Image: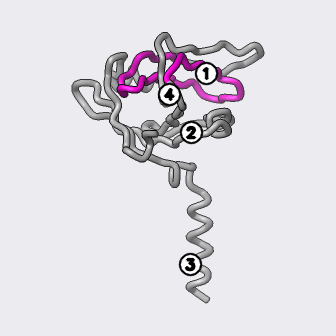
Amino acid sequence: MKGIFAVFLLIFLIGCTKGFSQNSNEIYIDNGKNLIKINAEIADDNNERANGLMFREGLDENDGMLFVFDEEKAQTFWMKNTLMPLDIIFINEELEIVDIKYAVPCLQDPCPLYKSSRPATYVLEVGGNFTAKKGIDIGDKILLNEKVLK
């Protein structure tokens, strides 16, 4: 009986986590001085990319979401139904940061669009002002786990 209770308790506790488990990956940003670790949830299909971080009330400081696209091109994001400010980090095929946008929640339609100035294959969303706090800039490199790469 104790074993069954322990299994149910474990399932309950796993269900209470923030969602950075099965699809969670460690990503590092090399800003030339430090390696900055980010626990990233992966959005690599149309449904996950469409939902993104909508309706989330917050992120822990080193948490984020990595959007993986099928092709390198200018990527466009918006903040519809996003409740917190975000830094949107655009990353090319060579895993170099090519653009960073500071995005605020959309309070009314039409929502502004945040488009990369250069083609990107990956987009990393982190909490607002994260890049400024950590000294992350255009030209910095990303280190990804092999299972994230297509």
Using the rendered view, name the quadrant where residue 12 is placed. Answer: bottom right
Q: How far is disc 4 from disc 2 in space, using C-alphas?
A: 10 Å
State the mark number for residue 6.
3
Question: Which residue range is magenta in the image?
Answer: 72-101
Nearer the viewer's eye, disc 3 or disc 1?
1
**Residue placed at 58% from the left, 76% from the top?**
7
Nearer the viewer's eye, disc 3 or disc 4?
4
Specify which label sits upstream in the sequence, 3 or 4. 3
Q: How far is disc 4 from disc 1 in space, using C-alphas?
A: 9 Å
Q: How far is disc 3 from disc 2 in space, using C-alphas?
A: 32 Å
Circle 3 SS class = helix
State the mark number for residue 43.
2
Q: Is residue 82 left or right of residue 67?
A: right
Q: Nearer the viewer, residue 47 or 100?
A: 47
Circle 2 SS class = strand
Is residue 87 part of the magenta span, yes or no?
Answer: yes
**Amino acid of disc 4:** Val
**Category of crowding for the residue at label 4, using alpha-carbon neighbours closer than 10 angstroms: few (below 14), some (14–19), many (at least 20):** many
**Category of crowding for the residue at label 3, using alpha-carbon neighbours closer than 10 angstroms: few (below 14), some (14–19), many (at least 20):** few
State the mark number for residue 77.
1
**Category of crowding for the residue at label 2, using alpha-carbon neighbours closer than 10 angstroms: few (below 14), some (14–19), many (at least 20):** many
Q: How far is disc 3 from disc 4 in space, using C-alphas?
A: 39 Å
Q: How far is disc 3 from disc 1 in space, using C-alphas?
A: 43 Å
